[in-house]
Each structure stands twice: as structure tokens, then as C-alpha cells.
Image: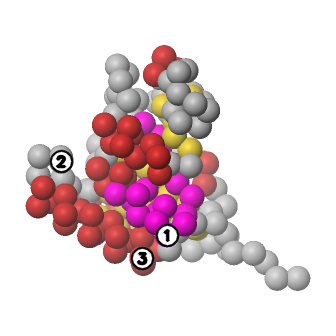
């Protein structure tokens, strides 16, 4: 009897609060082959200090350029960097808490036929994030951390779900 390989997960987020929320989700991928990507290369040490489960490889770490929607050239560099990470990792699942790099990652992952999860930032308490709204059609699971942001008038599966808060 051959042992199945563990699910490969790419967990990707911008630095700061997006990264903190993503890291707090790490118990959800216990037993998975995990790679992290963020815009702050300084987080590498944090990932390298993770406990490695027996039989699994150590978590891998990648960084990509930070960018905002007002920095078109940097967004192109970020997109290319995220594409490179996805090609190298070939994940089964991509999860992101945002922002622009997460949008790119989910869009590309869907093109590759991968499962995708978007968790909107807890900071977006008044409305869903712009990245979240734009990536929604490409997210197999779209989560908000604010129950009042659910979209009851949208057809089932067309709006975010609420399963609690990370922070």
C-alpha cells in the first residue's frame, strides 16, 4: 500500500496584519506540506523556527516585492514573482489573507486548476476589501471575519461566508 503525499499548501500574504492573520491560521494546515510567501523577507526566521512534523519537509519561505494599486510597475514585478512561486511550488491549495499579491496568487492558481481560499482582513470591518471583492469569482472559499458583511442578496456561493474571527 503506497502512502499518499501530503497536501501542498501555499500560504501567501502581504506583511503586517495580513501576515499575522495568516500565521494564526497555521493549525489549519497541520499535516500539510507548507510554503509561505510574503512581502517582508525578514519573516523568514519566523518560518524557519516552525516545528517540523515528522515525515514532512520543513516549511519553505519566499518573498515578493511589496506593491499597492498606485504602483503599477511594482504590481507587475509582484505578479511575476507570485507566478514564479506558484510554478516552483505547484501547490494543491492557495490561501491568502490579502492583499494584491493574494489576489494575483488566487487568480493564477485557478488558471492552474488549484483550490483557492481568500480570508478578508479583520481590518475591513466596514466593507469587504477591494482585493477580496475582485478575487471572489476565483476563490473556492471566500471568508469574511465580520458577520454583518455577508451578502444575503447574492446567490449562494457568490458572497463571503463567516466562520468566526482570526484575531
* Residue closest to the eye, 114 or 50: 114
Given this view, does label 2 or label 1 mark the residue nearer the observer?
1
Task: Specify the segment rendered in magenta.
Answer: 104-120
Q: Earlier in the sequence, mark 2 or mark 1?
A: 2
Given this view, does label 3 or label 1 mark the residue nearer the observer?
1
Q: Earlier in the sequence, mark 3 or mark 2?
A: 2
Q: Can you identify the residue that label 3 sits on? A: 87
Q: Can you identify the residue that label 2 sits on? A: 68
- Indicate whether residue 63 is drawn in magenta: no
Q: Is any part of residue 19 visible from this angle?
A: no
Question: What colour scheme governs how the chains and residues are painted in the rendered image of this protein?
Answer: secondary structure
Secondary structure at badge 2 equals loop
Q: Quadrant of residue 18?
A: top left
Image coordinates of residue 57 in percent, x first then y, are 57, 74
Q: Is residue 138 above or below residue 123?
A: below
Neighbourhood count class around disc 3 (C-alpha, 10 Å): few under 14, some 14–19, many 20 upward: few
Neighbourhood count class around disc 2 (C-alpha, 10 Å): few under 14, some 14–19, many 20 upward: few
Marks 3 and 2 close (CB-CB < 8 Å): no
Quick check: 108 left or right of 75?
right
Say the numbered circle drawn on residue 112: 1
Quick check: 156 left or right of 85?
right
- Indicate whether residue 118 is drawn in magenta: yes
- Quadrant location, the N terminus: bottom right
Image coordinates of residue 41 in percent, x first then y, are 26, 62
Amino acid at each position: 500500500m503506497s502512502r499518499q503525499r501530503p497536501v501542498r499548501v501555499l500560504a501567501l500574504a502581504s506583511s503586517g496584519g495580513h501576515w499575522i492573520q495568516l500565521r494564526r491560521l497555521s493549525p489549519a494546515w497541520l499535516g500539510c506540506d507548507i510554503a509561505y510567501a510574503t512581502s517582508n523577507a525578514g519573516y523568514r526566521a519566523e518560518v524557519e523556527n516552525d516545528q517540523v512534523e515528522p515525515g514532512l519537509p520543513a516549511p519553505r519561505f519566499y518573498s515578493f516585492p511589496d506593491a499597492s494599486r498606485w504602483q503599477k510597475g511594482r504590481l507587475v514585478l509582484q505578479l511575476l514573482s507570485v507566478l514564479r512561486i506558484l510554478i516552483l511550488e505547484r501547490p494543491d491549495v492557495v490561501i491568502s489573507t490579502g492583499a494584491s499579491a493574494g489576489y494575483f496568487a488566487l487568480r493564477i492558481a485557478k488558471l492552474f486548476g488549484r483550490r483557492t481560499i481568500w480570508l478578508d482582513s479583520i481590518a475591513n470591518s466596514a466593507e469587504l476589501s477591494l482585493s477580496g471583492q475582485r478575487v471572489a469569482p476565483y476563490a473556492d472559499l471566500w471568508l469574511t471575519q465580520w458577520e454583518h458583511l455577508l451578502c444575503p442578496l447574492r446567490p449562494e456561493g457568490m458572497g463571503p461566508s463567516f466562520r468566526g474571527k482570526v484575531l
